[in-house]
Image: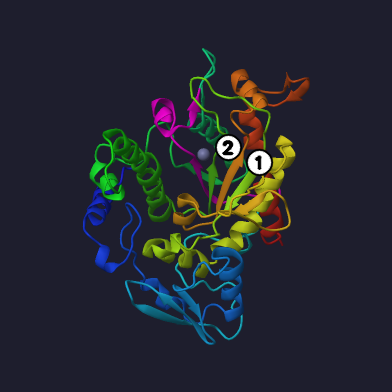
Amino acid sequence: MFDTPKLSEFVLLFFFLLETVGLGKISPLAAPPDWDWLANCAHTMTREEFARMLQNHYARNEAAAGWVELEEGGVRIRTVGDTWQNVPFATEATGTAPGLARFWRKASEMAPAPEAKPLLGVKIAIDPGHLGGAWAAMEERFFQVGKTLPVAEGDLTLAVAKRLKPMLEKLGAQVVLLRKSDKPVTPLRAKTLESAAAAELTGDFSADRLRRQSELFFYRISEIRARARMVNERLKPDLVLCLHMNAEEWGEPEHPQLQPRNHLHALVNGNYGPRELESEDIREEMLAQLFGRITEEAIPLCESVVEALAEETGLPPFTYFSNNASRVGDGAYLYSRNLLANRLYRAPVVFLEPYVMNSSPVWKRVQMGDYSGTKLVDGQPRKSLVNEYALGVTEGLVRYFRRERPPAK
Ligand SMILES: [Zn+2]
């Protein structure tokens, strides 16, 4: 079903290698953005709506100053180079009319669903975070205590995705996994990306530094961009579930530090920083999220899923002390943060970070493997990690769609 988008990958690499300096700053492996859609946003949002989303959610603390200027009747946006484009505001709230063509549907726009199938017809893409198997060590999302079972985030998220798919399908959803094996989606590899990686490094750098930068371009940037094209151009889902697991600093992967801290949080796209907004592509992506009203659907959806996951796992909330994330909503578990995946996917994204992989209880549960029913962990009956994660997510989606879909007549 997913033929590899080889051609477009290489076209993008070509764009990157072309000097785009004269046009403005573009982030690694991004194509120069197409701003044509902005003209369609005229009169779709009131000044109050736009200002609230920009100042409280997307670009807090004046982060967009110099790029996005609010005026009385409209907003001036710096697009390509020194070009500014004006988007007039609507005089009254239009509520749902998006300025961008969108493929995803709000739950409230869907047809009523029968009680037993609350997810009937909902198109869900599951994004199992990272890569697994032999790729996990390169990504540094892997550790092993002695000769025990290794812990690799990408293998765990894939196991959860595979458990989740039939559970959601039973409730009526149409589910596709962005990756079905431990292998990457992108056809590019670190070697192919060396010249792009070298362009990013400044001053003298060692061969080892170049190798690490090329690997980062491969598994983080090229891989997520390939998944984004799958989401936006082919799958066009109503929502995306990005499955991850968290970790605390573990030191050497062969001699990892296990520690007691264990927690949960979810992320919704937002909280862009001033440095990020200097890049034309990131600015365009933020405004597409804002005018597309994606966050308006994503916030309550994320809240529902993370709260159900908190109940199922019993995990306490994680607290950010850095300023790259900001608390959202009334609960303790949801933060806004600008990540490549939740920015590039042009649909509501639920980005989940339950469990600290190198906490003693989670490590112990990974060693126990997958099982049905419960087993005793530190004297408490617990489901397997994979089952618990999948059940929490399912329950959160069921609650959200039961509440938001129109009632059956
Ligand atoms: Zn992760």
337 or 305: nearer the eye?
337
| Residue where numbered disc 1 is placed | 264
Q: Against 212, is 53 above or below?
A: below
Mark 2: secondary structure: loop
N-terminal of the pair, mark 1 or mark 2, is 2
Considering every residue shown, the one lying at the far front of the view is 204
- On residue 217, the disc is none
Three-letter code for the amino acid on which mark 2 is drawn? Asn
Q: Against 89, is 1 above or below?
A: above
| Residue where numbered disc 2 is placed | 246
Q: Is residue 21 visible?
A: yes
- The yes-or-no answer for disc 2 within 8 Å of ligand 1 is yes
Image position, residue 327 (x, y; %): 66, 55
Give the residue drawn at x 72%, y 25%.
382
Magenta residues, as a range?
115-143
Q: Is residue 120 magenta?
A: yes
Pick the quarter of the image with the C terminus.
bottom right
Three-letter code for the amino acid on which mark 1 is drawn? Leu
The Cα–Cα distance between marks 1 and 2, rounded to whole angstroms, is 8 Å
